[in-house]
Amino acid sequence: KAMSKLVAELLKSWPEGSIMAISFDEESLDFRVATVSKSLAADRWAGETAALAGGKGGGKSISGSGTGKLSSREQLTKLVDFAIAWKP
């Protein structure tokens, strides 16, 4: 919930933006994503990004979240690259 609040606050400063935050635990390899956007399908963005690493996600068109477990630290780079390049 804290990440969702963070991206919602960022959207107030940049209302035309699309924002994703990713947190990652280096020991367990667990990750969380939170998205917010008025121009993209934020639920799909979070869900498809999480699914790349075998996770799940969803939400509403303006905000989404997802969780999962990476198979390696290197997979985090692929996750971030995918999130940046994602198009609905």
Image: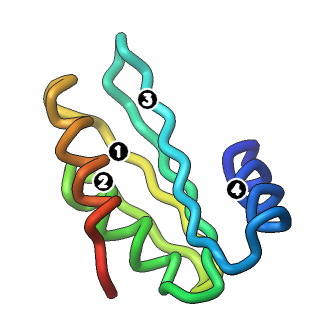
In this rendered view, identify the residue nearer to me: 26 or 84.
84
Drawn side of residue 84 relative to residue 3, left or right: left
Instruction: Tell me the amino acid under the disc marked 1.
Output: Gly
Residues tagged 3 and 4 counted as in contact (Cβ below 8 A): no
- Name the disc covering residue 7, or none: 4
Residue 24 circle label = 3
- The residue where tag 1 is placed is 68
- Residues under labels 4 and 2: Cα distance? 20 Å
Earlier-in-chain disc, 3 versus 4: 4
Left/right of residue 22 with respect to residue 30 in the rendered view: right
Q: What separation in Å lies between label 1 and label 3 (alpha carbons)? A: 10 Å
Give the vertical position of 31 relative to 40 (above or below). Answer: above
The residue located at (70%, 56%) in the rendering is 7
Residue drawn 75% across and 48% down? 6
Give the SS element for disc 2.
Answer: loop
Mark 3 to mark 4 CA distance (whole Å) = 16 Å
Q: Are marks 2 and 1 in contact (CB under 8 Å)?
A: yes
